[in-house]
Image: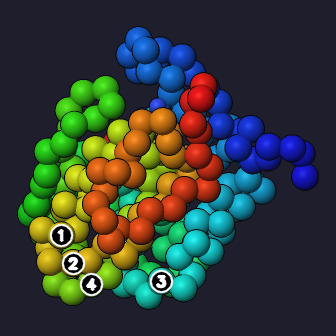
């Protein structure tokens, strides 16, 4: 196995989508069948001993990783989407992004009280998106039992926003220039 694989397949794109943001482009990793399978399996393995009822994926790249994790664990998959995309009645939360503001929506009947939920996304940056996803799960009286990422931008301290008792795991962590 080549050194740094498959993290080396995550490409840095400077100043995207706005100046000053170093965007972590995961499409080269997704393009590589072995790497994609490794990432989905590795994330599923992190949750193998965590009893859970559903996997939530956060639009859009969280769908790509969350769905195979749900498949591997034999769990249903719940999409958390950007506003206006879900056809049935929805519940929503607003949140701050690394580069702007946004909202997340879920179908109002997507999760039920007491369900144990895993949340999956590609990148943990400031943690605003993941914190919003946690809030949305909790608004349904469901419980977040794990949050998993392909890559964590550790220098942004995002996991600190997810609160105590919310187990966070990431396959890779980028500490920036430290
Ligand atoms: P945040 O809410 O700041 O933790 O941002 C996380 C969400 O925005 C994830 O859904 C990521 O896909 C995306 N994102 C934020 N910052 C980056 C970045 N530097 N590179 C790639 N994706 C990012």
> Which residue position is annotated with label 2?
142
Label 1 – label 3 distance at C-alpha: 18 Å
Q: Is the residue under label 2 in contact with that under label 1 (CB below 8 Å)?
A: yes
Q: Is mark 3 within 8 Å of ligand 1?
A: no
**Quadrant of the image containing the C terminus:** top right
> Which residue position is annotated with label 3?
50
Instruction: Estimate how packed mark 2 is, as few (under 14), some (14 to 19) or many (20 or more) residues with alpha carbons within 10 Å.
Output: some
- Answer left or right for 14 relative to 161: right
Q: In this rendered view, identify the residue nearer to me: 27 or 160.
A: 160
> Which residue position is annotated with label 1?
138
Query: Where does residue 174 sit, x and y in percent of width and height?
Result: 59, 39
- Which comes sooner in the sequence, label 4 or label 2? 4
Q: Where is ligand 1, by quadrant? A: top left
Q: How is this picture coloured?
A: rainbow
Q: In this rendered view, identify the residue nearer to me: 176 or 12.
A: 176
Q: Is mark 4 within 8 Å of ligand 1?
A: no
Secondary structure, mark 1, is: helix
Residue at 57%, 37% in the rendered image: 175
Label 3 – label 2 distance at C-alpha: 15 Å
Residue at 44%, 88% in the rendered image: 51
> Which residue position is annotated with label 4?
115
Q: Is the residue under label 2 in contact with that under label 3 (CB below 8 Å)?
A: no
- Which comes sooner in the sequence, label 1 or label 4? 4
Q: Is the residue under label 2 in contact with that under label 4 (CB below 8 Å)?
A: yes
- Residue 47, numbered circle: none
Q: Is 12 rendered above or below residue 50? A: above
């Amino acid at each position: 196995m080549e050194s740094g694989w498959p993290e080396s397949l995550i490409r840095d794109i400077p100043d995207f989508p706005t100046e000053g943001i170093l965007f972590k482009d995961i499409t080269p990793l997704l393009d590589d069948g072995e790497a994609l399978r490794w990432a989905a399996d590795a994330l599923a393995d992190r949750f193998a001993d965590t009893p859970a009822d559903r996997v939530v994926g956060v639009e859009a790249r969280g769908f790509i990783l969350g769905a195979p994790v749900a498949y591997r664990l034999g769990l249903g998959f719940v999409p958390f989407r950007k506003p206006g995309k879900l056809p049935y009645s929805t519940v929503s939360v607003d949140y701050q992004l690394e580069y702007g503001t946004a909202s997340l929506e879920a179908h109002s009947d997507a999760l039920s009280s007491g369900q144990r939920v895993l949340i999956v996304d590609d990148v943990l940056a400031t943690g605003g998106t993941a914190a919003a996803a946690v809030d949305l799960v909790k608004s349904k009286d469901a419980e977040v039992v794990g949050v998993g990422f392909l890559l964590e931008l550790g220098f942004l301290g995002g996991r600190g926003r997810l609160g105590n008792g919310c187990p966070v795991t990431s396959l890779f962590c980028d500490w920036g220039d430290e």
